[in-house]
Amino acid sequence: MGKFAKWLGAGAGFTLGGPIGALIGFAVGSFIDGVSVEDLSQEQREYQKRRQSSGREYVKSGDFEISLLILASIVIKSDGKIDKRELDYVRKYFVNLYGVNRANNAFKLFKGIVKSKISTRQVCMQIRQYMPHASRLQLLHFLFGIAQADGTIAIEEENAIHQIAGYLYINDSDYTSIKAMFIKETESAYKILEITKDASDETVKKAYRKMVKKYHPDKLVGLGEEHVNVGKQKFQKVQEAYESIKNSRGF
């Protein structure tokens, strides 16, 4: 069995099955030299055995990684072109997160995925079935980062991310909060805290406490330390938004 298939099988759980598994199989069989669909099928069978023996699904860091790659490809292609700066952002993100060797494997898979036809609805349905809400919010944060990598977020990219958010059962308040972390407007600080500018001081404080709990990095512990560190970025944005409002109001 090829080293790539072993890496993929060791890191992934639920994403080896369903529509995502089929997509990975197509990408592997069509675009990655030295790896066969049979290799991947063997890893899928091993996963199914583990799942059946334990009576539960496995959600691993590799599942998050594969979900990132698939959703990133949807956003990157949404404006009708594949921008090198966006591809570089994905690669740099993975190198910083996982190291060069693992990032090379991930990007090898990504180059196959980005050439594939993807059903946004089907892959999102599979992701939301197994991935907790905090992890889905982290996916959305990453997608906005990709869209902004070329200096601006095109309307097609924003629409694609909004559609993904809907399929992932991320409500409009959460979507607007994360969007405001990347698209600066007059009331961005309030939007990050999911409140309006006319909110009372007490409401601002309550909103801050709520958002701290929602975006706390500890909610990503199950995905590995690397994702906890990235999750701190959202947490910091919440703190910055609260400090901005505090300073402007003088409380």
Image (cartoon, rainbow, N blue to C red):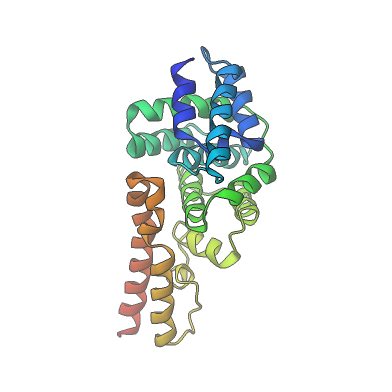
Q: Can residue 81 be seen?
A: no
Compared to residue 5, the image places residue 169 above or below, namely below
Residue occupying the point 58% across, 39% down: 52
| Quarter of image, res 166 | bottom right
Residue occupying the point 32% across, 32% down: 99
Compared to residue 248, the image places residue 228 above or below, namely above
| Quarter of image, res 18 | top right
118 or 60: which is nearer to us? 60
Q: Quadrant of the C terminus?
A: bottom left
Residue 189 relative to residue 240: left or right: right
Residue occupying the point 43% across, 41% down: 61
Q: Position of residue 36 (x, y in %)?
A: 57, 15
Q: Residue furthest top?
A: 34
Q: How many marks?
A: 0
Compared to residue 14, the image places residue 185 above or below, namely below
Residue occupying the point 38% across, 66% down: 238
Q: Position of residue 189 (x, y in %)?
A: 42, 70
Q: Can residue 16 be seen?
A: yes
Residue 227 relative to residue 24: left or right: left
208 or 132: which is nearer to us? 132
Residue 114 relative to residue 4: left or right: right
Q: Position of residue 233 (x, y in %)?
A: 36, 55
Q: Residue furthest front?
A: 53
Q: Position of residue 245 (x, y in %)?
A: 37, 77
